[in-house]
Image: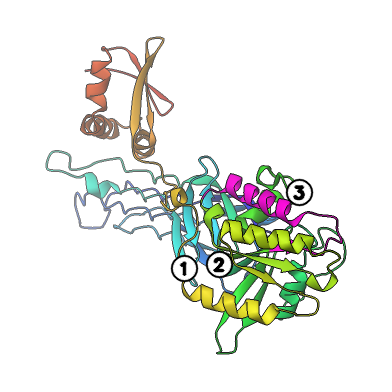
Amino acid sequence: MFTDYTKIIIKSGDGGNGAATFRREKYVAAGGPDGGDGGNGGNIYFQVDKDKNTLIDFRYNKKFKAKNGENGSGSHCNGKYGEDLYIKVPIGTVVKDAKTGKVVADLSKPGQTELILKGGKGGRGNSHFATSTRQAPRFSEDGERGEEKEIILELKLLADVGLLGFPNVGKSTFLSVVTDAKPKIANYHFTTLEPNLGVVKTKNGDGFVIADIPGIIEGASEGVGLGIQFLRHVERTRLLLHFLDVSGIEGRNPVEDFYAINKELKKYSERLSTRKQIIVANKIDVIQDDKLLKEVEELAKKENIKVFKISAATKQGVQELINYVEETLKDLPKEDLIEYEERKIYTLEEEEKWTAKVEDGVFIVTGKAIERLMGRVNIEDNESIYYLQKTLRNLGVDAKLKELGVHEGDTVILDGWELEWYE
């Protein structure tokens, strides 16, 4: 089964907690704090696997989690780092943030590996908080929680040439003739239910990859028929062969078909609509009236597009078309063909910002920085509270709350923790 779109949930590992311990050793008085740090949580990476060609592995397995870091212990023993998780995907996979739709990674190179989510940092042990005035800190930091995100995986086939055209215009037959691919072929619409790839071997030993894109119909850009799920595969091709049936057997008008499909391409992607095309007038061996063929030739002249008259079934004109495609590809650069606005790669990690507001006389402070801070402190420990106050000052939270009018005795909520403000 060909699977090219799925949603999954990924979670990086939690950081281990730091230890709040003291050296206890015979004949050693006042050994001092010796709590070790917690280990960092495991990261999540996505990696291209040359042996995969679909996203079928994610059809039923929807959640992936990296290992947590271990807690620190006494004698300055740090916790073990959580094991990183490598998720294998086929080449051509695009990773998007399900919430924003922005591209996080474009895995289009062999062996490419991308860091998607960082694990939580391990908490520091109490040995880090010893000072000349605080020689026996009884608190340590908790490890940071890992990130959890829902992401979209889209597979966009990487091919040099894409075959366009309405159903039953001969694309699959052409692919079977020029490559070793074995697509299902029959005389009815939508024989091709999933994209097929084939490699054309040229006389000089080079070759190029052709993708037979299933028939696209009017409304495809809105999801009609097989629609958008296959339009995405056209994006990664450098050259399009637009197949038109000039035989008249199906009762279709090839000129209307040409404009209908190009309209769908433009509605789906403005940039895709400018991709170089070659018109392939197919089924010339069974032409009933050359009127349609002449109309297609006029169309090609009007649009300044090269046209080839072939019969995929009898191979008439096929070799000439392949030779021209080979030469044309030499002048078309191999580049990243995803949409320009998608080329900026966004990180799934949220920025360490915070916001403060007043609601019904209660001061509420939220944000990633506050969440991380509250995960590190023990509000039942006086020294830890002192550390909290100092950090809030450094972050500028104190100044912002005073600007909002906070007074002693007011209620302040920090990431869900309700505290009483005092100067």
Label at residue 91: 2
Q: Nearer the viewer, residue 135 or 398?
A: 398
The percent coordinates of residue 75 (x first, y second) are: 29, 58
Answer yes or no: do the residues labelled 2 and 1 have beta carbons within 8 Å?
yes
Element type at mark 2: loop
Q: Residue at x 55, y 85 (%)?
A: 206
Is residue 259 rendered magenta in the image?
A: yes
Tell me: 68 left or right of 356. Answer: right
Label 3 or label 1, whichever comes before in sequence order? 1
The extreme top residue here reads: 360
Camera-nearest residue between 183 and 320 = 320
Question: In the rendered view, would you say 187 is above or below 342?
Answer: below
Q: Which residue is mark 3?
A: 225
Specify whether 144 is left or right of 423: right
Q: Which badge, 2 or 1, comes first in the chain's sequence?
A: 2
Q: Is residue 324 magenta?
A: no
- Region of the chain picked out in magenta, as a range: 243-270
